[in-house]
Image: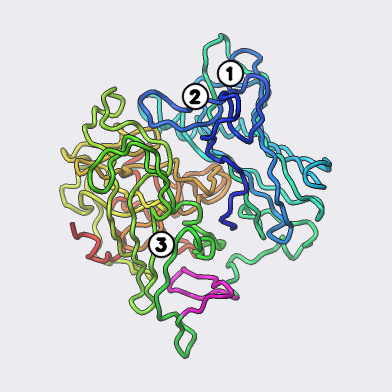
Amino acid sequence: MSSENLVKNADFSQKDATGKGALGYQSTGDAFWSWVGYTDEIVTAGFAFPAKAKASGSVSQMVTGIDQKEGKWIRFTFRGLPEQNFQVSGDQLFMKIDFYEKQGTEYVDSAERLIYREVEKDRKELAVNGNYGKDGAAIWRTYEFEELLPFPEVDSVKVSVGYKNGGGKSNAQICFFLDDFSVVQLQKSSTGLVDPAEGPKARNQTAVPTTEGLVSLGGRWYYQPAKTETLALNAAGRFEGTLRVTQANANRLFYRDDRLINPFAGNMTAWLRKGYLDESGYPVTKDTFVPDNVTLTFDGKAKVAVVRAKNIPNHPTAKFPDTYGTQGYNPSYIQVQKSVFFLPLEPVTNPRAIAMTARDENGALPMGSVGFAVNGVVFYNPFDAGMQDASSIMDRCCGHPSPDYRYHYHKYPICVNTPFVDKGERHSPVIGFAFDGLPVYGPYESNGVMAKDLTTNKLNAFNAHFDEVRGWHYHVTPGKFPYILGGYFGQVDRRNFRR
């Protein structure tokens, strides 16, 4: 996957000359530029689609610099939040890609995808992941549209999000909020789509993805060196050196399951938001971009990846300390951390592993960090410091800070879908890793079937099961204890327990 976002002013933060819109964007109808979110949240700039009766509108940008040599697939994504009562009639919430030639002056083709059904699906299937009317029915998530370039001459695309037939019964400003536009070019579809020109052979791909041309880093990890890179290999061709991965080369790092994926691409940077605390404990007074929120160093000899994370969430959060009471009056701040994790590259199951009891009386899963999401934010066990279930006092992205100011997740962090999208149409993607090296997947086992509801090959008490393609792995279980991990099913690098 390309790491270059071709959208200008992707976060909508720069205003246009009128001061009422976003620089580089065009809006129509009832759509308007706004700070998106709620008064108890750290909000960002974006657009709002009010759902008053018969409302309609759109927001778009003309993206130039398309070159088929960089990839014949266009991947358009944005992050959206449908408020609970947001409705449209006739499924009229859509993403659209218009294709142009001659520097964007000559229209040649277009493609459109309806996405309101995804809103309704999330409301139905993920409501149990929420609490008090948030997190489940009204969530931030990434919406995605991939399309093949129709002609080699295409050099520009106009990407749009729009809606028609607002279904509101009053003029109340119930909205669909959106931010974070992204357009990248891909050599191959990230969702398994196939170029018809490649014929039947492309449609009948083997279950095991090819790793030809990649360097094995250990276990399921692979790397594609740039032409100017040389990795330290022994006489047998095995990696024995060190390799540092940042956002700049994250698209060259692959994890193998039923396909080759880039789990960290697009997830290694963050914004340090006004209201957070910096590393020294001082309040942040201005939003600041953090290019190295997560980095990984692979050690070929030790067969371990050393993960360094500042633990800054790369998605919206509530305002902490919580003075509104919507997150249990949490008194803590979100602060920059200096976390170091040790991830085994070749996980080994533990024959003496024990799972948590209902209150973790057996200490099977310690308090504090037990793993991490691909954005570097840590996973905790289900309990707070008083050994009470903490899953009901999260913000909209299912996280909150601990007494030592460490933001963390106790349950399925839906916002970590970025940059990959889980529509519940196939096995969920990897969203993180436990400290035993086993991957943590989203909730779905297959199209419309959550892993927590399986009647065969059920999850065990650790929230883990085995299949021939992925090996042992965990699934998050929305609304069902233990939510993320029920204990370590594999052997843990003890250095992860240092404080």
What is the magenta segment's predominant secondary structure?
loop
Tell me which label, 1 or 2, sits earlier in the chain.
1
Q: Amino acid at mark 2?
A: Glu
Q: Quadrant of the N terminus?
A: bottom right
State which region is magenta.
213-231
In the picture of the structure, the residue carrying the numbered disc 3 is: 472
Contact (Cβ within 8 Å) of mark 3 with mark 2: no
Q: Which mark is residue 83?
A: 2
The residues bearing labels 3 and 2 have C-alpha atoms spaced at a distance of 37 Å
**Residue 225 belongs to magenta span:** yes
Mark 1 residue type? Ala
Identify the mark nearer the N-term, 1 or 3: 1
Depth check, front residue: 15 or 377: 15
Q: Residues within 10 Å of mark 3 (few under 14, many from 20)?
A: some
Q: State which quadrant residue 127 falls in.
A: top left
The residue at 19%/40% (across/down) is: 403
Q: Position of residue 217 (x, y in %)?
A: 45, 74
What residue is drawn where x is 66% and y is 59%? Answer: 188
Alpha carbons under labels 1 and 2: distance apart: 10 Å
- Residue 469 appears in view: no
